[in-house]
Image (cartoon, grey):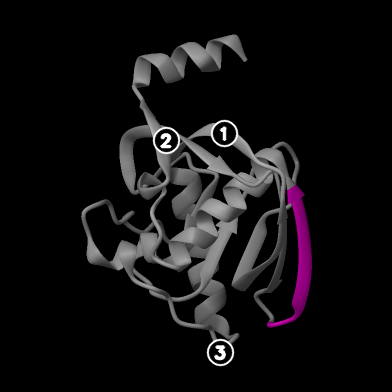
Amino acid sequence: MAIRPVITHPNEILTTKCTEVKAFDKKLATLLDDMYDTMIASDGIGLAAPQVGETMQIAIVDLGEGQEIIEMINPEVVEVGGSEIEIEGCLSFPDIYGEVERPFYVKVEAQDRDGALYELEAEDYEARAILHEIDHLHGVLFTTKIIRYVDLEELENEEEEA
């Protein structure tokens, strides 16, 4: 396992549509492990393969609090519902935060590290994190969805109130 550098904007890999994963092998497992280590070292809750320089449809989400690590390979959003506006940030955009509208609910079909197909349903913050990472796999950056930018002071004040 290794901590990889996180690609930051501007870099064209971040706007590249990723390719489907076909080989579910040791190389993939190593990449997933490296992505997890990188995400934790960067104090993130999600990471997509392009953020570590790989243009493959791979994303992970870990909300902590004893929840399972979500590894999504070749994920497809099959259903969404509801809507909410919340503040987001991104490891590829250090110190940039903004209000983004996303669905409250998402259902995703994806494959795990062994290639097995699974279905995942999520709501609220978990759904937001999953959709943010899936956007990365399509070259869509959260900054293209920001309704209103939020400065660091406002973000810290909101976190204190929560």
Q: Identify the residue position indicated by label 1 in the image.
A: 85
Left or right placement of residue 85 versus residue 127 in this view: left
Name the quarter where the C terminus is drawn.
top right
Please say if the residues under marks 3 and 1 sit with CB atoms less than 8 Å apart.
no
What secondary structure do most residues of the magenta stretch adopt? strand
Amino acid type shown at disc 1: Ile
Q: Estimate the x, y position of residue 54 in percent, counting from the top left.
A: 38, 72
Q: Residue at x 57, y 33 (%)?
A: 85
Write down the region rendered in magenta: 115-122
Q: Residues within 10 Å of mark 3 (few under 14, many from 20)?
A: few
Q: Residue at x 54, y 63 (%)?
A: 59
Examine the rendering and report whether any part of residue 1 can be seen.
Answer: no
Q: Residue at x 78, y 68 (%)?
A: 119
Q: Identify the residue position indicated by label 3 in the image.
A: 23
Amino acid type shown at disc 2: Ile
The Cα atoms of the two marked residues, 2 and 3, are separated by: 38 Å
Residue depth check, mark 2 versus mark 3: number of the one nearer the observer: 2
Check the image and report above or below for 158 versus 139: above
Mark 1 or mark 3, which is nearer the start of the sequence? 3
SS of the residue at dot 1?
A: strand
Q: Residue at x 49, y 43 (%)?
A: 44
Mark 3 or mark 2, which is nearer the start of the sequence? 3
Check the image and report above or below for 130 versus 115: above
Mark on residue 147?
2
Q: Relative to the observer, which residue lies in front, 30 or 71?
A: 71
Magenta span has 117? yes
Q: Estimate the x, y position of residue 4 in percent, counting from the top left.
A: 36, 59
Amino acid type shown at disc 3: Ala
* Count of numbered tags: 3
